[in-house]
Image (tube, rainbow, N blue to C red):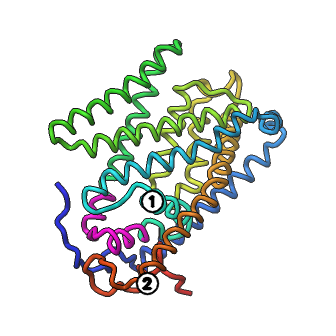
Amino acid sequence: MPAPDTSNADPNSLALSPAKRRRAIIGSIIGLTLVVAAIVAVALRRDELAGAWDALVVAPAWMVALALASPLLNLVFVSLALWIITAKHGPVRPAEMLALVSGAWLLNYLPMRPGMFGRIAYHRKFNNISLSTSAALLVLSMGLTATAIALLVVLGLALRWTDSLGVEIAIIAGTGGAIGLGALILGQTKGPWRIAAAIFLRYLDTLVWVARYWLVFHMVGHALSFEQACAIAAVSQAATAIPISGNGLGLREWAVGLSMAALPSWFMQPGATGAQATALGLAGDLVNRGVEMTIAVPVGLIGMAWVANRLRQHARSPEAPTAPRRPTPPTLEGPFGPPDQT
């Protein structure tokens, strides 16, 4: 059931308290510290990882191209999933959501997740979506993330029982087909088809994450099977969902590294130590983070520029209809989030 329409709800309900601001800043510092620690840990084992760097230097161009394209696919699938569940409550266009999520993707690397709060403020201003509805949609989005992680775990366990590539492809395609068919049936029966369609899109998103890890670990000279890539992707997504640092910065790298160390007999060659597995996992996800940032920076800046232009157009046309609201407090000013308070 959708949240009740309370367009005049107090915007301060989404403002961060001083204690939450401090926790957000501390979380960002922890994330940056963990990234630096990951780089140091990999550097200290540069001799053991010499083969990984050699493999990365000579990685095939098609692998590099696919690795760079994969974050764009993640962006598209996540944006469409958010659009489907949000468009029920306001006139949001797919391209509009893509621009918003692009900007939020980059800005959420900053403390206090300004991208998320800015997107909520934008929906209220331009799409007539109340704060309470946006809060409910955030909870639903977290549920979709949890569902996607669960699907990855089940998929990885199912693939582990077969060595046949054909069977693995059939399992992957069959799972997606079943979810998509369920969405179509619900659409015909006036059921919750939007949620089913969003789950389908998030399933495609998780498959892209599996492909990303398959690619980056092949690029550093360590071949993963599909089920291994599923396990790594599930751990990665779970770490990213922990609300400590933006986009799982630092947490994701160490979660991947430690997960490889926990199962050396599965992920590594016989005789490999846990420390070697951790170092390789850190190296692989640092490459993944580098690929992600290479795409997130320009795409995020484009998304932010689009939103800034929309705000300028609105400022020049004050007669344009917007959601009825009270004056917006300073905590929600700006196209994506709170202004610099220093």
In this view, 156 is above or below 315: above
Q: Residue 119 magenta-drawn?
A: yes
- Left or right of 83? Residue 128 is left
Q: Which residues are magenta?
A: 118-138
Quadrant (top left, top right, bottom left, bottom right) of the N terminus: bottom left
The percent position of residue 255, horizontal first and vertical second, equals: 56, 45
Name the disc covering residue 243, or none: 1
Q: Residues within 10 Å of mark 1 (few under 14, many from 20)?
A: few
Three-letter code for the amino acid on which mark 2 is drawn? Ala
Along the line of sight, the residue nearer the viewer: 124 or 105: 124
Residue shown at the point (35%, 84%) measured from the top left: 328
Gap in Å between the C-alphas at discs 1 and 2?
34 Å
Q: Amino acid at mark 1?
A: Pro
Residue 317's tag is none
The location of residue 285, given as percent across then percent down, is 64, 44
Badge 2 is on which residue? 315
Q: Nearer the viewer, residue 323 or 156?
A: 323
